[in-house]
Amino acid sequence: MLSAKDLVVGYRRGRPVLDGVDVELHPGATLGLAGPSACGKSTLAAVLALLLEPWSGSVTLDGQPVRGFRHRAPATQRTAIGVVFQQPRLAVEPRWTLDAVVRAPLVASRRRDDGIVAELTEAVGLTRELLARRPHEVSDGQLQRACLARALVLRPRYLICDEMTSMVDASTTALLVRLVRSVAAEGTGVLAVSHDDALLEAWADDVVRWR
Amino acid sequence: MVEREVVDGSVREWRSAARTRAGTPRGGAGARARLRLGVGAGLLGVLVLAAIVVPWLWPASEQLFDYTQVRRPPSGEHVFGTDQAGRDLFVRTLAGLRVSLLVAVICAVGTITLGTVVGAVAGFLGGWPDRLLMRLLDTVNAVPHLLLGIVIVALYRGSLTAVIVSIVVTHWTTVARIVRAEVLSLRRRPFVDAAISGGATRGHILRRHILPAVAGQAALSAVLVLPHAVWHETALSFLGLGLPPHLASIGNILSDARSELLLGGWWNVAFPSVLLVLTTLATAGIAATLRDRLVPRRRSELAL
C-alpha cells in the first residue's frame, strides 16, 4: 500500500495547497481524483510520486516509511512508483529517440531488458519506425504513449497518472486507459488524476472529488 | 490512417515553421549573418594558416639579429619592414600571432572546463555548495581582471603558464554564471523528474541530461573568450609582464614598437596592430553568428 497521512504541502510559505490530506493507494485498485484547476491534484500526485517533499506528514510505501524525496529517496522506492506526466513534450529528453526515452529507466537503474520494452511498445502501439524518431518528429499522443511505456518499463507496483490524457485525442485516451486498467488488473495500484469527471467515472474503481 | 496523416502533416508544418524561425533564417538578416560567418571564418582561417606556415618556413628570421638591416621600412624584401635589431617583422609578427592564438585556445579550453564544472555543480547541487561557489565567483569578479592578471603574472615573471593561468582565473566566472543559470532552469524540468522517478542518480542526470544540454552554451562562451584571451595576453606582454622578451608575441612586438614610433617607424606598430584587430574581429564575428544560431531568442528580442 502507498499511503500518505496528514500531508501539509505548498509552494509559498504560509500558504499550504494541501492541508491535512490522507490518501491510500491499494495494489490492484484504481483511485480517481477529480477537481478544478489549482485545487492541489497535481501536488498530491507529485508527493505520492516522491518528487515533491511535503512540509509535514508522512508517506509510507508497502510498510516502509519514505524518509527522503526526489533523489534523496532510495532508488528502490522511486522505481516502485511509475509516473506519467501531463505534458509529454516537457517530460522527455528532447535529444533522444523514443526508444532511448522508453529504455532510460532500465539504463539508469542498470537493469536488463527481458523483453519488456518490446512488449510495452507493442501494447501502446509504437512501431519500430516511430521509436527511431525524436520527440519533435511525433505528435503529443504518440509521445504520451512512449511516456506510459517508460513509466511501466520497471514494472512499478504503483502508477501515478497526472492528467495523463489531457493532451491526447480520444482514441489514444482509450488505448492508454485500457493499458493502465490491464496493469491494474495485474496488481498495480493506480492514482488517476484528471479534471474529466466522466473519464474517471469509467476508469477508476473509486473517484474522489475535490472542490 | 487519415488521422495519422493529418497529425503527421501538422507536425511537419510546425517543424518547417520552427526551422525558418530558428535554424536557417531567410532574408536580409540571414544573408548578413551567413556573410559575417563566412568572412570571419575565412579570415581566421587565413590568419591561422599564415601563423603556422610562415614561421615554419623561415624559422630563423624571427630571432635573427641582422644589424645591416636595422629599421628598414616595408619593401619587397621585408614586407612588414624590420625592427631595431634587424629582425624581419613579417615573420616575427606571425610568430607572435601563433603564440597569441595558442595561448588563447589553451585559455578557452581551460576556461570552459573550469567554468562548466563550477557552474554545473553549483546549479545542480544548490544549497550551501551553490552559495559557497557563487561567493567565490563574486570575489574573483570583484577584483579588476587586468589587476588580478598582473598580480599572478608578476609572481611568476616571464612564464607562459602564468599568463595562461592568469587568463583562466579571471575568465572562468562568465562561463560559470551562464552554465549555472542554464542548469538551474533545467533541473526542475519534468524530464528530470521523470529520470529521478526512473531511479537515476544525480551523477547520471548530470551526465546524461544536464551537461549535454549546456554544451552548446559552453562552447559558445569558449569562442567568446578567444578574443578576450588574445587581448589579455597582449596587454600583459605590452606592460612587460607577460611572455619573456625573446618569445615573439603581439604584445611584446607592440611594446618594443612604442619607442620606434618616435623614430618614425610606423610599420612597427601598424602591421602587428592590424593583425591583432583582424584576428579579434574575425573571432567576434564567428561568435556573434554562432550565438544567434544557438540562442535564437536573442534575435527575436531584437526584432521586437
Image (cartoon, helix red, strand yellow):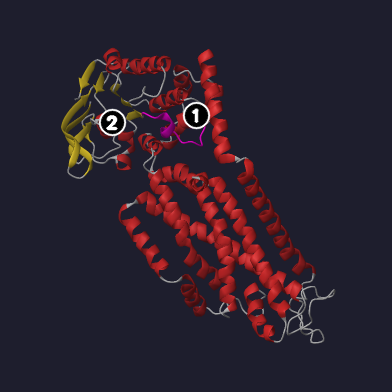
Instruction: Work out whether residue B93 or residue B98 is closer to the camera in this orientation and state it.
Output: B93
Q: Position of residue B258 (x, y in %)?
A: 64, 82
Q: Amino acid at mark 1?
A: Leu
Q: Are marks 2 and 1 on the same chain?
A: yes
- State whether residue B120 appears in this view: no
Return the x and y of residue B101 as percentages of the image width and height. Answer: 64, 65
**Which residue is disc 2 drawn over?**
A42
Chain of the residue under the numbered disc 2 shown in the image: A
Q: Is residue A98 visible?
A: yes
Q: According to the image, label 1 marks what residue?
A: A98
Q: Earlier in the sequence, mark 2 or mark 1?
A: 2
For this view, does A192 lie left or right of residue B85? left
Rounded to the nearest angstrom, the CA distance separating label 2 from label 1 is 25 Å
Amino acid of disc 2: Ser
Which of the two residues, B51 or A127, is positioned nearer the viewer here? B51
Quadrant assignment, res A56: top left
User: What is the x, y in percent for residue B107?
Assistant: 55, 63
Q: Is residue B5 above or below residue B247?
A: above
In this rendered view, identify the residue nearer to me: A175 or A62.
Answer: A175
Q: Residue at x 45, y 52 (%)?
A: B179
Let me know if residue A87 is in the magenta part.
yes
* Mark in front: 2 vs 1: 2
Q: Residue at x 36, y 23 (%)?
A: A166
Please state which of residues B108 and B278 is positioned toward the viewer in this rendering: B278
Residue B208 at what x, y percent from top left? Answer: 47, 42
* Subunit bearing disc 1: A
- Looking at the image, residue B216 sits to the left or right of residue B28; the answer is left
- What residue span does the magenta drawing correspond to? A86-100
